[in-house]
Image (cartoon, grey):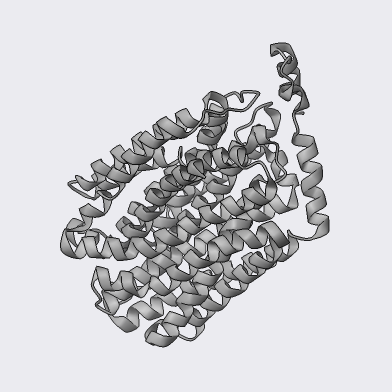
Amino acid sequence: MLVLAICCMSLLIVSLDTTALNVALPAMRRELDASVAGMQWTIDAYTLVLASLLMLAGSTADRIGRRRVFMAGLVLFTLGSALCSLAPNLEALVAFRMVQAVGGSMLNPVAMSIITNTFTDPRERARAIGVWGGVVGISMAAGPVVGGGLVDSVGWRSIFWVNLPVGIAALLLTWRYVPESRAHRARRPDPVGQLLVITLLGSLTYAIIEAPQKGWGSTEILLFASLAAAALAGLLVYEPRRADPLIDLRFFRSVPFSGATVIAVSAFAALGGFLFLNTLYLQDVRGLSAFEAGLYTLPMAAVVCVLSPLSGRLVASRGPRIPLLVAGGSMAVSGLMLAAFDAETGTVSMFAAYVLFGLGFGSVNAPITNTAVSGMPRSQAGVAAAVASTSRQIGQTLGVAVIGAVLAAGMAHPGAADGFVAASRPGWWIVTGCGFCVLLVGALSSGRRARDTARRTAERLAEPVADAPAAGPTAQSSAARTGS
């Protein structure tokens, strides 16, 4: 339980930083004289680097030691937070956010791998993951309120100060109490695969964010879109040929694992878009202060905080199907209220939409994580958890990029209430579609036939040779060649 608490501290500072930053966006935009695209980059520069490096961090932790990588991540994240608080302009802030992201990439997937190897009983692990998900709810509840209060009283730079004492405390506790662990067989680095992942995510995000300003059919945007497509094709051709790929495509033979990946992208795309639109609406259209805007999000965050551990217990006792159906249905209805009925224009209806979104998001985290790591060999826990975490960050990156691009294209009269509401409506339809995707994929990926594919995939991924103490370099090399 102490190890779980230490791992949850890392999740708290990462999640708290993200939710507090959303509330601070209008203040940052005014001080730094940034456009909508500039605000997108303050979020997506972080999530983009994070998504690009999560799988590398997971496999590196499995190879050289999970505690060692976890501590390095805490150092870098804390240092990046200090630099962000000192950023003199938007470009420096974006660069320092990328430093933060390098450290953040070493925290969540590695912490989840530590938890997976600490809680070996499936029921205990599901409950631990539920507690882990509850921390997301706590950060969603505390982040906007704490961040809003700091922005109004001290300034937006102070939101990064919160990370410093928590990061230092987590570092000291990790050094003292978390045991070192690593996979039995070290996975070799995959620099080509890593470069292809960075190219794919970076090119795609740049094309989406900059397209409204430069033109969807411009040479520059078409070039970056083509580069993203080429990188994706390269991954699909190159990775299956490697004995130790960065992305083991065999994972996706498991329908539940593939479904969890799609659900994670959809759910976090909805979250990213929801927070982005909501923050700008409450402060720029309704004229609320940052602290008041944070208070308005409390109903949603409170539901997430309460429901996440309950969802973990439900996954432990009944499986992931019910939480996934609840999550998809609730998020879809919430998005539909905001897209078709302008629920944000009435306080009661807006709060109802917030509560429904919190119900959905609070239900979805535990089944995503549990499905990703359950059934996979413990020797590959870091990689499996990293794929799930990467899917989350890709979803949030794309959610902010796509919905922000749609908003920027539709803002005919910036600052006018009717103009913003009309321009944001396509974004809310995207959130609705993401909710329906969670509902449909959750239903298809949680049945008996889907679970059979997970069992067969786990058997293919098992590494009996590497688990034997007497297995030397020759035996391990043979295991790598056969992909056992």
Name the side, left or right, on which 160 lies relative to 88.
Answer: right
Query: Looking at the image, is 442 positioned above or below residue 450?
Result: below
Q: Is residue 14 visible?
A: yes
Q: Is the residue 25 above or below the residue 101 in the image?
A: below
Horizontally, residue 143 falls left or right of residue 111, namely: left
Q: Residue at x 48, y 86 (%)?
A: 341
Residue 216, visible in the rendered structure:
no
Q: Position of residue 460 (x, y in %)?
A: 79, 36
Residue at point 59%, 23% (across, down): 188
In this view, 336 is above or below 366: below
- Residue 462 location (% of width, % of height): 76, 33
Name the foreground residue: 161 vs 8. 8
Q: Residue at x 23, y 64 (%)?
A: 149
Q: How many marks?
A: 0
Residue located at (48% from left, 31% from top): 67
Q: Residue 159's spot in the image, x, y percent?
A: 26, 54
Asked if 313 appears above or below 96 in the picture, the reply is: below
Asked whether 33 or 147 is in front, the reply is 147
Of the pair 331 and 146, the residue shown nearer to us: 146
Quadrant of the frame with the C terminus: top right
Dividing the picture into quadrants, the one containing residue 404 is: bottom left
* Residue 274 drawn at (x, y percent): 44, 68
